[in-house]
Image (cartoon, grey):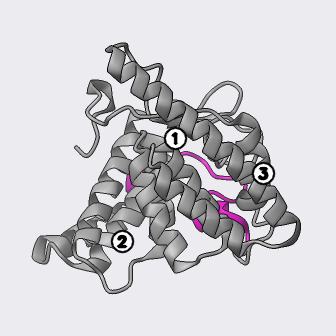
Amino acid sequence: MLFDLKTGKRRRVVQIVFGFLAFIFFISFVGFGIGSDVSGGIFDAIGLGGSGGENTSVSSQFEQQIDEAEEKLAEDPKNEKALTDLARYRYLSGQDQLDFDEAGQPVLTEEARSEWNAALDAWERYVKTDPAKVEALVAGQMVFAYEAVGDIGGAADAQRIVADADPAPENLAILSYYLYSAGRLEEGEKAADEAIAAADGDQKKLFEKQLARLDEEARKAVKAQKQADDSGASATGETGLSNPFGGLGTDPGAAPVAP
């Protein structure tokens, strides 16, 4: 099992909630591809675009692809193609097993969490093979899976792969967001500076304002966490943040996935 959030094995570092920032910045400029060369925006890239479909079972939708990948890995545990296939289809399987509340908002089920943990396990095994060219599209899917299961540091590392493959200002801004949210302030500042340098016109002005606010809030959160640690008091929250993609669908007002 890759994660065990219930027992708190992942260190709780920073809690940053940016309702306005997430809605305006990430949804407007990233989710729908505004100012980006990516057709359809990040939702389509990670398999979340469109109106969605029915919650189908793994056996009817992805069992064959998963079985084939696992068979190849039984013969060669370091088969890079099989590992990325397993990560991709476990991710899609988990997406299909999300539930929805009465308001139509997505809820992370135990089945979806299990599939995404399996996807992330395959992904981390793939990264350890030190591939010559990392699969950036699958990395983008893993960013979302990491965030959904509560590993913001993992999301930041996966997003770095996405940004390295395509250093568009939007990708660098998302990298900055996750790094700051994981408490990695200097790395977050560097990514923010790169995002601003890569942007131009009105986008540059918006990035300068939003990322400066992000930097300020992240530093406050880290300081508060340090004070709590020094005093022995319980931290106010885990490594959580307002979902920068506004939920699992294309609705910018959608709530983050409920655990």
Q: Is 41 one of the magenta-colored residues?
A: yes
Which label sits in the foreground, 2 or 3?
3
Mark 1 nearby-residue class (10 Å; few <14, some 14–19, many ≥20): many
Q: Callout 1: helix, strand or loop?
A: loop
Q: Callout 2: helix, strand or loop?
A: helix
Residue 157 percent across, percent down from the top left: 41, 60
Residue tagged by mark 3? 209
- State the residue at coordinates (41%, 63%): 89
Q: Nearer the viewer, residue 178 or 32?
A: 178
| Label drawn at residue 85 | 2
Residue 95 percent across, percent down from the top left: 50, 50
| Predominant SS along the magenta part | loop
Residue tagged by mark 1? 98
- State the residue at coordinates (38%, 31%): 12
Q: Where 89 sits versus 55, above or below?
A: below
Q: Residue furthest left?
A: 75
Amino acid type at image mark 1: Leu
Q: Is residue 210 found left or right of 90 in the rendered image?
A: right
Marks 3 and 1, the one that precedes in the sequence:
1
